[in-house]
Image (tube, rainbow, N blue to C red):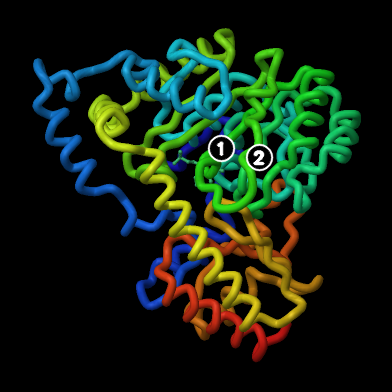
Amino acid sequence: MTPRFAQRMAEVRPSAIGELLALGADPSIISFGGGYPDATLFPAEELEACFREVIRAPGGQAMQYAPSNGLPRLRQQIAGLMQADGVACTAEDVLVLQGSQQGLDFAARMLVDPGEVIVTEDPTFLGALIAFQPSQPRFAVVPVDAEGMQTDLLAEVLAANPQARMLYTVPDFQNPTGVTLSLARRHELIRLANAHDLVVIEDTPYRQIRFAGESLPTLKSLDSEGRVIHLGSFSKVLVPGLRLGWAVAAPALLARMGLLKVAADTQTSTLNMAVASLYLDRYDLAAHVAGLRRAYAAKKEVMLDAIRRHFPQEIGATDPEGGLFTWLRFPEGFDATAFMREVALPRARVAYVPGATFFPLTPRPNHARLNFSAQPEAKIREGIKALGEALKSHPR
Ligand code: PMP
C-alpha cells in the first residue's frame, strides 16, 4: 500500500544529513559526530552489581510494573539532587522520564497547537527540533553568542510573536555550541517569560559536566511563577543506555505530563529505575561525576590545543566551560556539509556534524559541531591533525 499519513507527520522526515552521519559509523573513520559519553568511563562493575541485586529483590519488585510517574525512592533521590543544585522541590514535583528526550516530546505535545510558536536558540539541539515537529509548530529563533541566548534579541522576537507559547533553552554548555547562558541573561529570560506568559523548557543534560568557572543557578531556581519545566538526565553522568531522565515542574504542568507518560509507555523501565536508585544509595555519584569532569576537561584541552596547532587561523572554535562539544566557525562561504562529504570523510577520514542541521529556520553552512568526549586523546590528536591538513590543502 501507499500509506496515507496524518497531517502531523508532514514535517517529520529524516535529517538531510542522516546519510552523511551514517558514514561516520565506519570504524576506520575518527568520528567527532555523535554526542556520546566516553564508554570507558561507564561504571560497569557498579551497575552490574546493582542489576544483580535488584533482580533478586523480594517478590520480583524490580521486574514488576511500577507507578507511572516513577519509583518513589528514585523520585525522592532526584528531588535530593535538585535540592543540592538549589531547586526547592520534593519527590512530588518529579516525573521520571525515559530520557530527557521524552520530556521534549511531552512538552510540545501538551503546550503547542499546530502553527503556534516555539522559541529556540539559533542554533539549537537537533533532537529537540525532531521532538517538536509532530506538534507542527512554527519556530522563532534567537541567536546565541558567547553568553548564550541573546536576551535583547529574545525581547524583539517575543514582541514580534506575542502568541509564542513555549521557549526551549539549553542554558548550560549548550548543544551544539557549548556556550553557557550568563547570570544576567538568566534573570532577563525569566523576566521576559513572565511578561509574555511563556512556559520555559530548561534542558540540562550537561549541567553537571562543568570543568571551569562557577556553576550558575538553574532557571528553575529563579522561577517564582511555576513556568519553568526543568529537564534533567542521567545519560551524561551515569550511562545513556539506562534511558533515564526527569522533569521537575509545577503541579499543573507535571500532572499533564504524567498523563502523556501513561499514554506513551505506561512508565519508565522498573528495572532501570531500580538500578539507578540503588546506584545512588550505594555509590558516590558526585565522585563519579568529578572523575568525568577531569577526563572531559583534559580531552577538551587536547582538542582545542590540536585545533590551535593544526587548523587554519581563520577558523574559530568555542572554548566551553563544560559539556561535550566545541562549535567551529569557518569563514563565510565555506560549506561544512559539502566539505565533509567531499574531503573530511573520504580523505581525512574524520566525521563531525555539519552545523547547518542545528538551525531551525535558516541553515548557516559555515559551522560544525565537534564532540570531544567519545574519542581517546590519541585519536583526538590524530583526527584534528588530519582535519586541519585537509582544511589547509582543500580551502573552499
Ligand atoms: N537534550 C540535549 C540538549 C541533548 O544533547 C540530549 C542528548 N544528547 C538530550 C536532551 C537527550 O538526552 P537523554 O539521553 O536524556 O534523552
Element under disc 2:
loop
Where is the N terminus found, in terms of image quarters?
top left
Viewer can see residue 19: no
Q: In the image, residue 352 lies at what x, y percent?
A: 55, 67
The residue at the point 40 percent across, 66 percent down is 25
Above or below, comparing residue 57 to residue 13 in the picture: above
The residue at the point 74 percent across, 41 percent down is 182
Q: Which residue is mark 1?
A: 204
Which of 108/93 is in front?
93
Which of 243/18 is in front?
243
Q: Are marks 1 and 2 in contact (CB under 8 Å)?
A: yes
The residue at the point 87 percent across, 40 percent down is 153
Relative to residue 121, is residue 157 drawn left or right? right
Q: Which of marks 2 and 1 precedes in the sequence?
A: 2
Q: In the image, residue 361 lies at what x, y percent?
A: 75, 48
Q: Is the residue marked 1 within 8 Å of ligand 1, measured from its CB?
A: no
Q: What amino acid type should be assigned to the residue bearing mark 1?
A: Thr
Task: Kindly indicate the quadrant of the structure image that contains residue 269.
Answer: top left
Where is the C terminus found, in terms of image quarters?
bottom right
Q: What amino acid type should be assigned to the residue bearing mark 2?
A: Pro
Q: CA distance from mark 1 to mark 2?
A: 7 Å
Above or below, comparing residue 3 to residue 332 in the picture: above
Q: Which residue is mark 2?
A: 171
Task: Kindly indicate the quadrant of the structure image that contains residue 266.
Answer: top left
Q: In the image, residue 112 lies at what x, y percent?
A: 66, 23
Viewer can see residue 367: yes
The residue at the point 72 percent across, 43 percent down is 121
Element under disc 1:
loop
Mark 1 crowd level (few <14, some 14–19, many ≥20, 10 Å Cα):
many
Above or below, comparing residue 175 to residue 319 in the picture: above
